[in-house]
Image: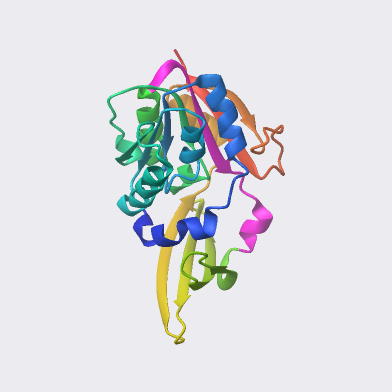
Amino acid sequence: MDDFDLYAPFYDLDYGDRTEDVWMYRQFAKRCGSPILELACGTGRVLLPLARKGYRVTGVDISPAMLDVARRRVEAAGLGERVTLVEQDMRRLDLPERFNLVLIAANSFAHLPTQEDQLAALDRIRRHLRPEGLLVMDVVNPDPVRLMEANGQLRLEKEITDPTGGRRLLKFVARRMDWAAQTLHVTFIVDEMDDGGRVKRTVFPFAMRLVYRYELELLLRLAGFRVEAVYGSTDLDEFGGDSPQMIAVARPDG
């Protein structure tokens, strides 16, 4: 698995203002109620809004550095009684309770590098769901046109200013598609520049194994799920070939 500790100091600066999927998870939380499990919870971007709404949430992540950031955010928000954070690998998930709702947000499922890893994680998830519980999983719908542009070229993606410390960051990204392995190799490079012009560089390589709709549905069925729906966006639009995402909703089959 990829070393997400490397990117933990930058994650909230880069993605912390992403909120477009939070509404969707709140709708499923209303439907299912507590307890809720979020896998690959990172720094708590999705977990915290659910806890603020009164839900009891367990967050699991493989990265201790990501969890350290999440723990500080939970403590600052005064939500320690509603939130439990656990360092585990979802492929070997082992928690003492079962859940009404399991979430995997922001294409995190794609970080599982093989079908065997994907099936192992789905099997552990099913074992942690209550009989009428739901799994809601957000994965990217692979766009062949965009993937054709993933040729390894390094590009400046954005400039970020840290509002707390004034740090100026430059984020570069290179993407390379391995079509045979159905895997997108990505490298983030973050340059931190101080007032004296000195640069500290962080390089974070990772890989995402892409899945298509019917492969995803088959994986879920092989792992013992019944697919309830596949939506095309976090607004729960009907899925189509040009949909940006696949929101799979499934429940244990029997």
Asked whether residue 178 appears in the rendered view, the answer is no
Q: Is residue 189 magenta?
A: no
Q: Is residue 146 magenta?
A: yes
Q: Residue at x 56, y 23 (%)?
A: 30
- Taking depth in this image into account, of 211 and 29 the one nearest to the observer is 29
On screen, residue 28 above or below 174: above
**Colouring used for the render:** rainbow
Whole-percent x, y for residue 168 in the image: 51, 74
Whole-percent x, y for residue 64 in the image: 30, 50
Asked which quadrant contains residue 231, the reply is: top right
- Taking depth in this image into account, of 204 and 175 the one nearest to the observer is 204
Whole-percent x, y for residue 173 in the image: 53, 67
On screen, residue 108 above or below 222: below
Outermost bottom residue: 196
Asked whether residue 117 appears in the rendered view, the answer is yes
Outermost top residue: 254
On screen, residue 231 above or below 149: above
Q: Residue at x 59, y 45 (%)?
A: 19
Q: Residue at x 46, y 69 (%)?
A: 165
Asked which quadrant contains residue 4, the reply is: bottom left
- The total number of labels drawn is 0
On screen, residue 111 above or below 252: below
Whole-percent x, y for residue 158 in the image: 59, 68
Q: What's drawn in magenta, residue-wise?
A: 129-149
Q: Residue at x 63, y 60 (%)?
A: 148
